[in-house]
Image (cartoon, rainbow, N blue to C red):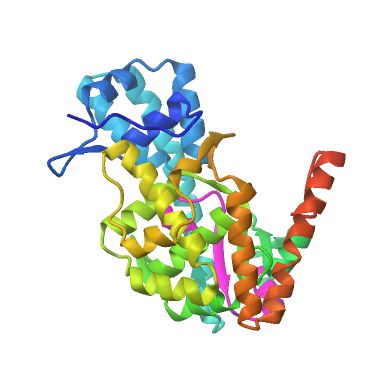
Amino acid sequence: MPTMTKSVPNSPKSLLLLSRLLLPSRSGGASLQTTPEIVSELTSLSREEFDELLRLANSNHVVVRAFDVAAAVFREAKDQTRLEWVETALHAERARIQSALPFLYAICEAFREEGLDITVIKSLDHWPDLGSDLDLYSGGDPDRIVQLMKARFQAHTEARSWGDRLAGKWNFKIPGLNESVEIHIGRLGQTGEQLTLAARVPQRARSFRIEDWTFSVPSASERLMISTLQRMYRHFYFRLCDVIDSTRLVDAGEVDFEDLRASAEACGIWEGVAAYMVIVSDYVQGYRGAGLNLPQFVRSAARFGGEQIYFARDFLRVPIMPQSASLYKTQLTGLIRKRKLHSSARLGLLPWLATAAAVGQKITGSDKGIW
């Protein structure tokens, strides 16, 4: 029998359904993705409920993966009305992706022609879905990269916030491309403190092929560390795609956990990486009856797990106090202990930046220009 869903607090019906579609229960090693309960729930969706499901799938970057399953259910059930809904959504999303990919490839080729390293980070983690922005990393010279983007793609740079400047991040808008192009240059991390990780990304990158295009993407360890920095140290929320992407890596046997621990320790974020992995595992266990196959040293290093997660404003939220704050303190202490004074000084600015953003949000209703 399928395992009963154990959801995080405040999970709406749309999140529960998406999670069941993407994390099928297992019985005897077989996936049970289209149980009678799921079929019944899908085929009873009103138009309003379907639109909400699509909206949440969009914000969590899982439209293609979730709706491919839903389409198969509707075909089997001969539910032509809802099949048309889902096929329309899939067509629109695939059209968006097919429009963005040539731009992404052209940017990468332009960098290579100029002798600049370029790695696609985050955006292709979700494949066959695609992120809402095109995110890249390069260790090249910032002025040279900005000039390249302007000369080759008629791109214009968007206004940079204080946080963008600290993080070494530029955002570009290219004519004909709906997505923003975000390029991290020479640094990673909220305040650009992650020089060690930044150097490792191009050094350990691997090739990832989509149709006739080949991209350079981070190795599994760097990919998980980048996700950890984004979720546990910056935004304090998970998208559903983070859970699905990381689960796929572990299930496929692509994660060398000893390498992940050594890499994360060198970057001062091992406790955060361990907590990230346990949160993913706990969420997965709630849907398919078994978590990820994590070594004990990962679980023992995690200061908290999925029991702390709750749903709010479209995402799975991580408490900032005291959980994420303790990870920040550990990272800062580790940098100081290793005498990485420049990086620790940058990271030490984070609370002030966050405070300024909060004040700006309260006064003007926006943290734009700060965060």
What percent of the width, then of the height, locates residue 71? 30, 31
- 325 above or below 152? above
- 292 above or below 91? below
Residue at position x 65%, y 74% in the image: 148
- 74 above or below 121? above
| Residue 179 visible (yes or no) | no
In this orientation, which residue lies closer to the viewer: 244 or 112? 244
In this orientation, which residue lies closer to the viewer: 132 or 144? 132
Magenta span contains residue 126: yes
Q: Give the range drawn in magenta.
A: 121-149
Callout count: 0
Task: Say which quarter of the image contains residue 62.
Answer: top left
What percent of the width, then of the height, locates residue 224? 44, 62
| Residue 360 visible (yes or no) | yes
Left or right of 183 on screen, residue 98: left
Quadrant of the rendering where the N terminus is positioned:
top left
Quadrant of the rendering where the C terminus is positioned:
bottom right
What percent of the width, then of the height, locates residue 65? 35, 42
Left or right of 213 on screen, residue 170: right
In this orientation, which residue lies closer to the viewer: 75 or 227? 227
Residue furthest left as drawn: 28
Left or right of 268 on screen, residue 13: left
Magenta span contains residue 260: no
Residue furthest right as drawn: 363
Residue at position x 36%, y 65% in the image: 297
- 20 above or below 98? above
What percent of the width, then of the height, locates residue 216? 43, 71
Residue at position x 42%, y 39% in the image: 63
